[in-house]
Amino acid sequence: MKNIKKIALIAHDSKKQEIVEWALKNKEILKNYELCGTGTTSKRISEATGLSVHGYLSGPLGGDQQIGAKVAEGDIDFVVFFCDPLSAQPHDPDVKALLRIANVYNVPIATNVATADYVISSMK
């Protein structure tokens, strides 16, 4: 029995439309994976694509940490996190913790479209 790989989808407010567009562009690929994401991001992607996206809490309310825990448990294979590098985030420590945990567990984390495209095209 083949394990289905899991992808987490997260975006800061100013990047939500960008991740929705990325998901629409990659819908045929993404339908082969189990998807999850933080609050509004998961809802917007699900509504736009028709894909099932398990929603965790909003990032500022603990969603980033929930996804980080799933990375640490080995339940997530790839994180797409479209960050806004030009705006301060009130939950910046949570964001940095998620980036750190992905690095600790050697899980690819894409913070922009170019990297997300590269990784998704190479996943098997």
Image (tube, rainbow, N blue to C red):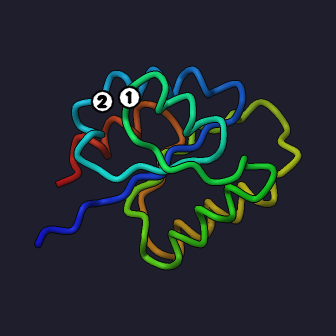
Horizontal arrangement in the rendering, residue 8 relative to residue 32 (left or right):
right
Q: Which residue is mark 2?
A: 27
Q: Residue furthest left?
A: 1
- How far apart are the alpha carbons under marks 1 and 2? 9 Å
Mark 2: which amino acid?
A: Lys
Tell me the element at label 1: loop
Residue 104 location in percent, x, y?
A: 53, 75
The image quadrant that residue 96 belongs to is bottom right
Horizontal arrangement in the rendering, residue 90 relative to residue 35 (left or right):
right
Tell me whether the residue at label 1 lies in contact with that at label 2, contact meaning CB atoms closer than 8 angstroms.
Answer: yes
Work out which quarter of the rendered image holds the C terminus and state it: bottom left
Mark 1 crowd level (few <14, some 14–19, many ≥20, 10 Å Cα)? few
How many discs appear? 2
Q: Earlier in the sequence, mark 1 or mark 2?
A: 2
Residue 119 location in percent, x, y?
A: 32, 46
Residue 18 location in percent, x, y?
A: 53, 23
Horizontal arrangement in the rendering, residue 123 relative to residue 34 (left or right):
left
At 46% from the left and 44% from the top, the residue drawn is: 53
Q: Which residue is mark 1?
A: 50
The image quadrant that residue 56 belongs to is bottom right
Mark 1: which amino acid?
A: Gly
Residue 82 location in percent, x, y?
A: 57, 37
Work out which quarter of the rendered image holds the N terminus and state it: bottom left
The one of 39 and 71 positioned closer to us in this rendering: 39
Tell me the element at label 2: helix
At 43% from the left and 64% from the top, the residue drawn is: 76
